[in-house]
Every structure is written in C-alpha cells, then in structure tokens.
Image (cartoon, coloured by chain):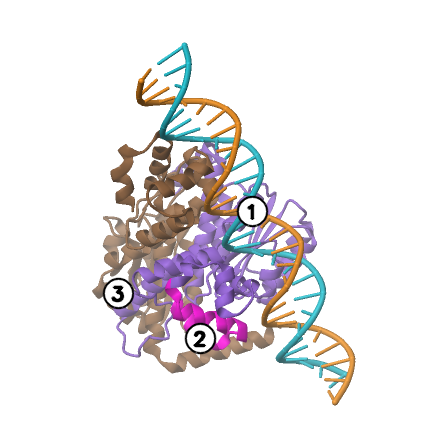
Chain colours: A purple, B brown, C cyan, D orange
Amino acid sequence: MLGQIRRQLSRFSKTERKIAEYVLNHAELIPTMTTKELAAKADVSEASVVRFTKSVGIGSFKAFKILLAQELVNQEEYITDFSITQKKDTPYELFQKVVHVNRGAIDLLLASIEKKELEKAVKTLQNARRILFYGVGGSAVAAMDAHFKFTKLGYQVEYHADFHYMLSVIPFLSENDVFVAISMSGETKDVLELARFAKQQGAVLIAITNLNKSPLCKEADIQLATPNVEKDFRVGSITSRMTQLTVIDALYISLVNQMGEGIIDRYQNAREQAVKLRR
Amino acid sequence: MLGQIRRQLSRFSKTERKIAEYVLNHAELIPTMTTKELAAKADVSEASVVRFTKSVGIGSFKAFKILLAQELVNQEEYITDFSITQKKDTPYELFQKVVHVNRGAIDLLLASIEKKELEKAVKTLQNARRILFYGVGGSAVAAMDAHFKFTKLGYQVEYHADFHYMLSVIPFLSENDVFVAISMSGETKDVLELARFAKQQGAVLIAITNLNKSPLCKEADIQLATPNVEKDFRVGSITSRMTQLTVIDALYISLVNQMGEGIIDRYQNAREQAVKLRR
DNA sequence: AATAAAATGAAACTAAGTTTCATATATTCT
DNA sequence: AGAATATATGAAACTTAGTTTCATTTTATT
C-alpha cells in the first residue's frame, strides 16, 4: 500500500500529494487518527482525505486505517507489479512472483470491496428475474465464469462475447433485471455502451471495476471495487481476473447460502446425471 | 490479545463470555464489524461490547479492532473449505471466507507445482507450433484465459468449448504441437479422450490437474499439479480456477520474459489500434 | 426476605466518517 | 484570448458508529 502510494505520487493532485506525504512520513500514526486530524495535519479538508483513500483504491477511510495497521506489523511490502521482472528470471522464479502478485491482489480486495455495496448486490441478485453479465478481453473470463455459476443456481442468465448478441437482449430488460458490467478500467466502450443501454431500460447496473473516476464506476447503481493493482505496462494486468473472479465467487456463495438446501439438491441432481451420461 | 482473552474466560461474566467466544471464533471478522453487529452476533447489547473491550484493558472498541487486525496478520491459518459455512453467514462474512480460501489455495500452489515440470512446460511451449487448450465446466475458464493470453503472444492456439470442434482439430497435430488438458479431477471423460487422441498423434500432453492417481495425471508428459484443496461437496470447488489461472499466468509471463522486447512491441501495437478503433 | 451490589440493555448523546453542493481552478475549444 | 467545460476542493449537511447514562434486572449478602 505504502509502496503503491509512493509510486503514484506523480499522478496525484496538489491536495492529494499533501495527504500522501503526510501518510508516507507518519504511516504509523494513521490507524489511530480521524479524518479530521489527518485533514488538519495535511492542511486539506476532510472530504479530500476520504477522496484520497478512494483514489488509491480503498473503499473507505476505515479500511485504509486497518490496512495500514496491518502493513506496518511487518514492513514487508507486497510485490504488486512486474516492473521488477528481470530479463534473466527463471520460469520458477517468475512463477513465485505470479503467486505473490495474485495473492497480494486478492488480499487488497478485502479493503476495496465495501460491505454495504456487497450486501446491496446480493440482495439485488436474489430478487433478479434475469441477469446479464458482460466483459471483454481479460474480463470476459470473469463474465463467463459468472454465467456458468449463476446458471447452476437456476437463474436466467445471459452472457455472450458478441456485442451485438448482447445488444439484442437488452431491449427486453426491465426493473427486475440486473446488468453486471465487468471491466478493469471502467472505460471500455463496448461494456459502457451496453451498461448504459441496460440502465436506460430500467435494469440495475452492478459494476465490477477498479475504483476510480471512470464513467462505469460513476454510473453504476452498485459498485464492487477491485483494487487498483498497478499493472505492468508491457503485459497488462494479470491480477484483475483473480480479483474479479473472487468477487463472482463471493456473490455466488452468498446466493447459495441464502437459497438453502433446495438449490443444492438440484445441483447434486445435475452432477449425478452428468456422471451417468458421461461414462 | 487473543491469548489473553482466552486465559481470562473464567473471570468473565455470562455476557462477557458470549462476546469473548464470538471474538475467539471469528477474530478475523472483528476489524470490519461495528459494535452493533458484534452485539447482535454475540446476542448482547452494544453497551456490553464497549464494556468488554475496556474490561480486557483496551481503551475503546476502535483500538480493539485495530489491535486484532494487527495480531492476525501473521496468523496464516487458511480456511480451505466451506464446510464451516453456516446458514446465517452474511454476504460480507462469506466474502471474507472466499478471499481466505482463494488466497490459501494459491499459496498451496507453491508446494504442488514442481520446478522441473514447470521448466519442461515452458521449454515445450516455447518451441510449440500449435497449442490446444481444453477444459470443460469450471476448467473451461482457465482454457479460455489461456487461449486469449497465448494468442496475444502470436501463437497458433485453438480452444473451443465444443468437444467435436476440438476433435476435428486433433488429427492435424504432430510432434511439435502441444495439448494442454485442464481438469481438476483428471477424470473428466471429454478431456481425457481428447488428451489421449492428441498424444496418439504425437503431440506433447501437458496436464493442469490435481495431483492424484487420475488417468490424466498418469498419462501426461508434463504434470503441472494444482493443490487438492478440499472442496465443499455442495457447491463444487471454487478454488480450482484460481490455481489453474495462476499456472496459466506463470506460463504466460515466462514466455513473455523469454521472448524479449519484440513480442511486446507487437502487443503494444495491438493495444494502440484497439484504442483507436474502439472510441 | 430485605438490601446492597453488580450487570445489563435501551436510549440518549457524542464523535467520526461520508456525501452533497457551491465555489474555485484548470483545461479545452472556438 | 475568451468562453465553455471539466475537474478539484472545502464547508456544511448528513449518516453512521461508538460511548455514556440511567433505569431495570439479576445476583450476592446479611
């Protein structure tokens, strides 16, 4: 977290930098400070403090405090990107780095997801008539996984990689339907256009995206924020899939949990049939 | 802190003990809870929660939360399955469990992957003419991700969910080709049949599968073993995707690393075009 | 059984965190 | 350059969380 803030210093605005500097120099004090105190110390407003935590991809100031407290226990910082990747790394070394990066990203997800938003999402999905998932490129993986999982729960789910196919489904959406847009940047044109169209039809828009000022993030009714793990500019983000899938997992498990045994019986049934049919 | 609470159990009143018990059993949840929530879970009043923290010598509930967060950083005991999932878990609790489980699974991958096998896999893929990925059900996600990543590297990759489509590709395989079979159990009939057919054509068979006595594992030329994370029989394994994808990531990053800058330029090129075309 | 002491929860209160909105500043376009 | 637009910021309103008070219940003591 601290390393990430340090690396982003240049990206920050004047006000954000004032906060970042205070945080970097007095990290150990933050967990016991209030927004008001930090605001005073950094000579900015309280609102800016809250905004700062969101801008570094943390859901709330409270989560930020806890994250820093944990980080300072042992100073070992997570490797969150591959900029350190050397030309002569062996496959096994790279594998270890991948494990580290992926695990670190999933960990950060704890701080970026907001409890309330998650609860809203689960409640919305519970009562949903139809659910559409959409993501392109890397995020298509998460959409596909969601499609598979939610279908198993008996939902009427649509996901197709083809933009035009999805487009043709949206006119039939209404208030009880949900459109789940998955995009790391929150700026992908295809995803954004479909999301807007779906919302216009009255569907609830859930966004699984990095926390930022992206249009998707702003326009979503419910935001499930994935952490802003810095990506290697050369190979793109490999971690976003992990966090996106973890979010899907959490939604899926929550729904299973609330549906009770009935749904599990049907699922078992399907499995038994599969075993019979496939051998 | 937790030890201290445990030691004082006998000293506590009935109400205090209720709180202590919940704290001991769900310590990792406390840092994100409010007094109200903990009060509800322990079936006591909010006032008692605050009094409890004072009674164990902590100034405020807020300080208590931060202390627990710090204490749990180094306590890496992973939950590896969901059998503990209670009927009355909230979505956020389940989310935290999912994070735990997924992170734990990725960690275990460090122990299950063998260095030599990984190196063999990378070497084989480097020289591959064509690469086929195949997985069904949950493992289709990993296959799809691999398809996407390896295509970006300029490989001639085939992946299709349809068994018969894949079947029709295999007769054209030869010694320089690779078939990557992805299956958690290593027993899925479709995957197994295609893998055998591909091997018969002379292709190298790489298996990404749980380490066990499954036919796929035995017959593979190269085994990339995913950990046998205990799965909740009711909802199916949610972790296998994580580990499978991490393996794919490692292979991908290794190949990028060895290919050098040339491939990265082409990739950048594609990205720039994408930006131009899509807005 | 009566009284005192301790424990507890409901509700009032205080503090903390977050959002909104108006204003200031920067950026883009003509 | 100047208007128009977008972005950033702080003050204040608002919401939520944490703490204290006080009346009530429970337990212990005489």
Q: Is residue A6 visible?
A: yes
Check the residue under mark 1 and report the chain it is in: A
Which mark is drawn over residue A120?
1
**Relative side of B25 to A36, left or right:** left
Residue type (three-letter) at the residue carrying disc 3 = Leu
Q: Residues within 10 Å of mark 3 (few under 14, many from 20)?
A: many
Residue drawn 41% across and 35% down? B42
Q: Nearer the viewer, residue A269 or A173?
A: A173
Residue type (three-letter) at the residue carrying disc 2 = Phe
Which mark is drawn over residue A233?
2
User: Which residue, given by chain and number where applicable, does mark 3 sit on?
Assistant: B118
At numbered mark 3, what does the secondary structure look like: helix, strand or loop? helix
Assess whether residue A130 is covered by the magenta stretch: no
Could you confirm whether marks 1 and 3 are on the same chain?
Answer: no
Label 1, label 2: how many angstroms apart (C-alpha)? 34 Å
Label 3, label 2: how many angstroms apart (C-alpha)? 25 Å
Mark 1 or mark 2, which is nearer to you? 1
At numbered mark 1, what does the secondary structure look like: helix, strand or loop? helix
Which mark is drawn over residue A27?
none
Q: Is residue A109 visible?
A: no
Q: Nearer the viewer, residue B34 or B271?
A: B34
Could you confirm whether marks 3 and 2 are on the same chain?
Answer: no
Compared to residue B58, the image places residue A17 above or below, namely below
Residue type (three-letter) at the residue carrying disc 1 = Lys
* Screen quadrant of the N terminus of chain A: bottom left
- The magenta span reads A2-28
Q: Do the residues bearing badges 3 and 2 touch, measured as CB atoms within 8 Å? A: no
Residue drawn 64% across and 53% down? A169
Q: Residues within 10 Å of mark 1 (few under 14, many from 20)?
A: some
Could you confirm whether marks 1 and 2 are on the same chain?
Answer: yes
Q: Position of residue A202 (x, y in %)?
A: 68, 50
